[in-house]
Image (cartoon, helix red, strand yellow):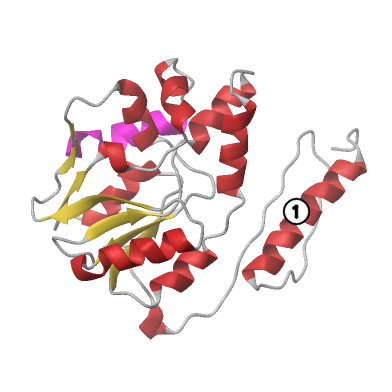
């Protein structure tokens, strides 16, 4: 925006460049536009060996589901726009959004990972739905799912997103909640900006993989299992 300080633009571009550098990528160009609001984004191109691709729908019954970042970013940011989020909750959201998934991906190379997805716009349960893909089910321990604690309270006060409601409509018929508070339901549907990775890990590797992630300082948790109950997502 032409009326805003160029110092703000400089800080935005500096932050983006720092993350590009941290990821090991190269910023190769770009363009700018004059608009009435701030817009910033990056398009990523890369090359990957076909034998090293981990798909999102190749998990197996019995796999442990390990999530590397807390949920609730969308809800906290919504509450912040309304002036209701605490500084602590907002800092937790910012820390999560600015943490790359690079470390988790690198740790995963040493373990038997059957499937992996990022958790972004479709929310935790939406991406679980993609993972099971008409051939598996999932059982989720809501008490073990990492999340920003205050997000549950904000959701209970209806600081929720339109995208979260679309996620509920999209996948809700597959989900069976067992005595889960409304606020926690919303956290599980909440779309994430720069969310974590959700791994389907072979049972024999789950404990050591989780410890390796946590040793890197990641707030990862083992929060469920894949099952052979087709298209059934149970949350208890």
- The magenta stretch spans residue 42: no
Whether residue 161 appears in this view of the structure is no
Q: Position of residue 205 (x, y in %)?
A: 26, 69
Q: Decide if residue 95 is in sight here.
A: yes
Q: Is residue 229 left or right of residue 25?
A: left
Foreground residue among 173 and 16: 16
The C terminus, quarter of image: top left
- Say left or right for 154 vs 93: left
* Residue at 27 percent of width and 62 percent of height: 200
Q: Residue 79: x and y, percent?
A: 56, 23
Magenta stretch bounds: 162-175
Classify residue 108 by image quadrant. bottom left
Q: Is residue 171 magenta?
A: yes
Disc 1 secondary structure class: helix
Tally of numbered tags: 1
Question: Residue 99's image quarter?
Answer: bottom right
Q: Residue furthest left?
A: 229
Of 191 and 110, the residue lying toward us? 110
Q: Residue at x 48, y 80 (%)?
A: 48
Q: Is 195 located above or below residue 31 in the figure?
A: above
Q: Position of residue 199 (x, y in %)?
A: 33, 61
Above/below status of 203 relative to 230: below
Measured from the top left, where is residue 30 in percent x and y? 77, 62
Is 32 positioned to the left or the right of 115 in the image? right
Query: In the image, is residue 82 above or below residue 213?
Result: above
Prevailing secondary structure of the magenta residues: helix
Residue ID at (35%, 61%): 210
- Where the N terminus falls, by quadrant? top right
Side of 131 relative to 5 (left or right) = left
Q: Which residue is mark 1?
A: 15
Neighbour tally class for label 1: few under 14, some 14-19, many 20 plus, Cα within 10 Å: few
């Amino acid at each position: 925006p032409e009326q805003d300080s160029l110092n703000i633009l400089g800080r935005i571009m500096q932050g983006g460049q720092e993350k590009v550098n941290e990821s090991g990528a190269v910023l190769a160009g770009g363009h700018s536009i004059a608009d009435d609001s701030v817009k910033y984004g990056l398009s990523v191109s890369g090359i990957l060996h076909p034998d090293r691709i981990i798909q999102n729908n190749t998990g197996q019954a019995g796999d442990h589901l390990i999530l590397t970042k807390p949920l609730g970013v969308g809800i906290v940011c919504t509450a912040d726009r309304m002036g209701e989020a605490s500084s602590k909750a907002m800092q937790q959201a910012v820390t999560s959004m600015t943490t790359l998934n690079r470390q988790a991906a690198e740790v995963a190379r040493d373990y038997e990972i059957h499937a992996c997805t990022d958790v972004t716009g479709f929310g935790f349960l939406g991406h679980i739905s993609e993972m099971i893909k008409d051939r598996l089910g999932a059982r989720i321990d809501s008490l073990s799912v990492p999340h920003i604690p205050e997000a549950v309270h904000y959701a209970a006060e209806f600081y929720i997103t339109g995208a979260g409601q679309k996620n509920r409509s999209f996948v809700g018929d597959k989900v069976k909640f067992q005595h889960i508070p409304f606020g926690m339901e919303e956290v599980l549907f909440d779309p994430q900006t720069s969310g974590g990775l959700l791994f389907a890990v072979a049972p024999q590797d789950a404990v050591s993989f989780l410890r390796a992630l946590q040793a890197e300082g990641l707030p990862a948790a083992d929060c469920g299992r894949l099952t052979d109950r087709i298209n059934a997502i149970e949350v208890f």
